[in-house]
Image (cartoon, rainbow, N blue to C red):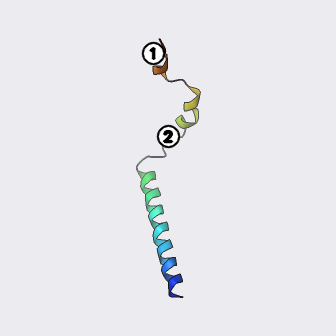
């Protein structure tokens, strides 16, 4: 029975760590650019044309 309490405590601690990491990522601006990643694949890099010439 004591092992279950330790496992619950450890899982809450790990979940709190992941929540803290997520909140840190949101506050530091990791998720601000929502448009560019979805269309980045549609455009060629400008440096590719220079290397091929």
Say which residue appears at 54% left-offset and 23% top-offset.
Answer: 44
Say which residue appears at 50% left-offset and 87% top-offset.
Answer: 2
Say which residue appears at 45% left-offset and 20% top-offset.
Answer: 47
Task: Locate residue 12, reporting x and y percent.
Answer: 49, 72
Rendered image quadrant of residue 21: bottom left
Which residue extends farthest top?
53
Task: Locate residue 42, reporting x and y percent.
Answer: 59, 28
Side of 41 where 25 appears, left or right: left
Rendered image quadrant of residue 39: top right
Say which residue appears at 45% left-offset and 17% top-offset.
Answer: 51
Rendered view: 34 above or below 17: above
The residue that disc 1 covers is 50
Q: Nearer the viewer, mark 2 or mark 1?
A: 1
Looking at the rendered structure, the secondary structure element under dot 1 is helix
The residue that disc 2 covers is 33
Which residue extends farthest front?
52
Q: How many marks?
A: 2
């Amino acid at each position: 029975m004591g092992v279950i309490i330790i496992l619950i405590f450890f899982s809450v601690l790990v979940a709190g760590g992941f929540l803290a990491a997520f909140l840190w990522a949101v506050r530091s601006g990791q998720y601000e650019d929502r448009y560019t990643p979805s269309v980045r694949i549609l455009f060629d890099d400008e440096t590719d044309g220079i290397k091929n010439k």
